[in-house]
Amino acid sequence: MQQPTAEGEMIINIGPQHPATHGVLHFVITLNGETIKKVEPHLGYIHRSIEKMCESLSYRQFIYVTSRMDYLSSHINNHACCLVTEQAMQIELPARALVIRVLMDELTRMASHMLWWASMAMDIGALTPFFHAFREREMITDIFEDTCGTRLTMNYMVPGGVLMDLHPGFQNKVHAFIRQFKFKLPEYDELVTDNIIFQNRTKGIGHLSREAAISYGCTGPVARASGVSCDVRKHFPYAIYDKLNFEEIIDTGCDSWARYNVRMQEMRQSLSIIEQLIDNIPEGDFQAKTKAVLKPPKGEFYSKVETARGELGVYIVSEGATTPYRIKFRSPGFSNLSALEHMAVGGKIGDFVAVMGSIDLVIPDIDR
Amino acid sequence: MWSLNEIVKRTDVKLNEMFSPAMAFLFEAIIVALLAISLFAILGLVLVLMERKVSSFMQVRLGPNRVGPKGMFQTVADTIKLIVKEGMTPNNVDRFLFHLAPFLVMIVAMILLAPLPFANGFQIWDVNIGVLFVSAVSSVSVIGILMAGWSSNNKYSLLGAMRSGAQIVSYELSAGFSILAIVILSGSLTFSDIIQSQANGWWLFKGHIPAIIAFVIFIIASTAETNRAPFDMAEAESELTAGFHTEYSGMKFALFFLAEYVNVFIVCAIGATLFLGGWMPLHFGSNTSFNHVMDYIPGIVWFFGKTFFLIFVMMWFRWTFPRLRIDQLLNLEWKYLLPISLINLLLVTVVAISGWHF
């Protein structure tokens, strides 16, 4: 049992079972009254040694495990793993596969941001937005279910393209979703963004300066809200992101409110990407011809993608065998979590949940 | 005409004919106690169901719809579950205070029922300091909450109780000041007199802008006093799991839960009585035919209608707004509501003295 270090301080545990941690994350918080003095995250409650598991699986198989890392952006995780394998094997992808991948990535990003929006509002105490966001998110998961067969762990991308072709009703359903979402987005703003209580709860809370964001290795919306330009889709474009017209959202507010706004704007950008692509899906193969057994040459390979939470890197050391010799994931959630103490210390307990909500933690992504 | 007033009087006369005055009083007390307890049980069932239905209406879902027609007996089933559940007592709690706290909170809610006028002449105790009595007794419930938080030997509970203490004590002030506005306008502390003074129009409409300001402040302050969102600091489930009643289970938890809803009912009933005329029907000045039609609706319907409207407003708050932070909550009271209600009190006094109200 932990003992407080100074007079008048007390220690409370937020987690591993706590309504605000959205999973089994454990914080040991030192408090003075309501003011936070120290935050100590304890990890490992759902560590499944995914990296080690991947090392005993072939280059086709290990992709399926990665859907279980950041379960809210499983398409994007799969994409990262496919990219590194394709880079190693030097596989050229057909145009249709690239477009399908980007469409799926952006739909995933929107679904993930919607869930974040819902849970952030819930952390701050508004319960109704949760159901409103799930109403729209349900449409995306339905689209995924039609095409991939699953709703959460899609396992849709394979080295060389995607597993199967799009469902015939894909375009109609995406159009229906775009209509619905454009109609409902102002409602999101009315309900949460424009709410004065919500603004007071998030503005100026959890300050993370540009320098701190860089030194903690933050990526994704957390870093972009601190003014760091770090969108992998812009700086190291993969798939067809270099041909698309979208903006990297950067805010210099450095607080929870900025992080909130970055994600809200990113949803709009993702929507615009989907609109650009949905009527222009090229005909052709959805998968390149690849060998049955993939044996990348000896060497080290690294590729990175932008997930909904930030930069996901996959590093593979190949010995020329059918399984990777060593695999390492650079997960965005872990680095973003490390900045939590920096942001939360000095605030109140109420601020802590507002900051934690704005980082958008997915615990299996942190623990792997 | 059939009225509750008649029934009360006849019962009183009948009992006094049959028994000695002391026995008659005893019987009356028993009848009142039974009525109060059954009102509590019904309120608990109805309000919890109402909350769940209102929330589901706002959250694009159906809400309870399995037990009974349209899920009407869901809360009955929940109550049975809570009654048969084991009431656990954690180790190292202060047993006496731990067991006393839920009853204290409940008893306070019950006492507050006494001066409420449900209909014309249908009131348990028309005390001549009714308004003062209500604001005095309602402050006691904070002791129960502090007791629960302290005795639970749990840090979440302690934090929740301290928050709740700070919150209730602060908001008591502006609630009191907004009630005082009506006391000044009507010139009486008695609930029945306050209602009689609204015979030709409710204070919300008669009292010009000061009455409206007082009403808004009263609604905000009473939401805070009953620990409901957006002021549910004491529970704040995303911060303190369940706040002061984290360690309670079974029927003791149910008592806290019930007390919350009964308190909501009581503050809304007081709001309806002071600002919306209580059981007094809606009257428009000299429009006699309209007033006559309105008189046909029994007073108890008016009373419950107005009260449930205010309860709906409070539920609306709860399912729409995010929660405030504790320091913002206290800022709101001490920096905004309290000065506004003080100035408002002055305005009301000016209005009342110069007779500007209708």
Image (cartoon, coloured by chain):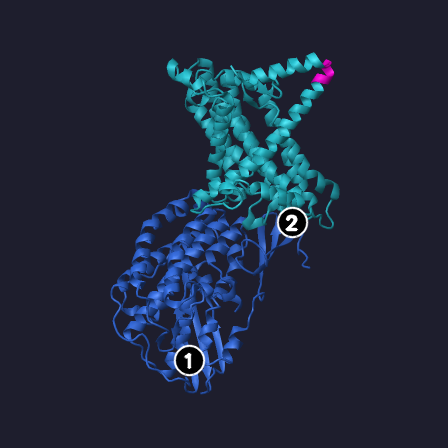
Chain colours: A blue, B cyan
- For disc 1, the chain is A
Residue depicted at x 44% and y 56%: A116
Q: Secondary structure at mark 1?
A: strand
Quadrant occupied by the C terminus of chain B: top left
Q: Amino acid at mark 1?
A: Phe
Marking on residue B155: 2
Q: Residue B135, percent across and down? A: 59, 27
Q: Is residue B156 above or below residue B211?
A: below
| Residue beneath disc 1 | A301
Q: Which residues are magenta?
A: B19-24
Q: Is residue A63 above or below residue A225?
A: below
Q: Residue B125, percent across and down? A: 62, 20
On the question of residue B105 being in view, the answer is yes
What is the C-alpha distance between the residues marked 2 and 1? 50 Å
Q: Is residue B103 left or right of residue A285?
A: right
Q: Are marks 2 and 1 in contact (CB under 8 Å)?
A: no
Q: Is residue A168 left or right of residue B336?
A: left
Q: Residue B215, percent across and down? A: 47, 28
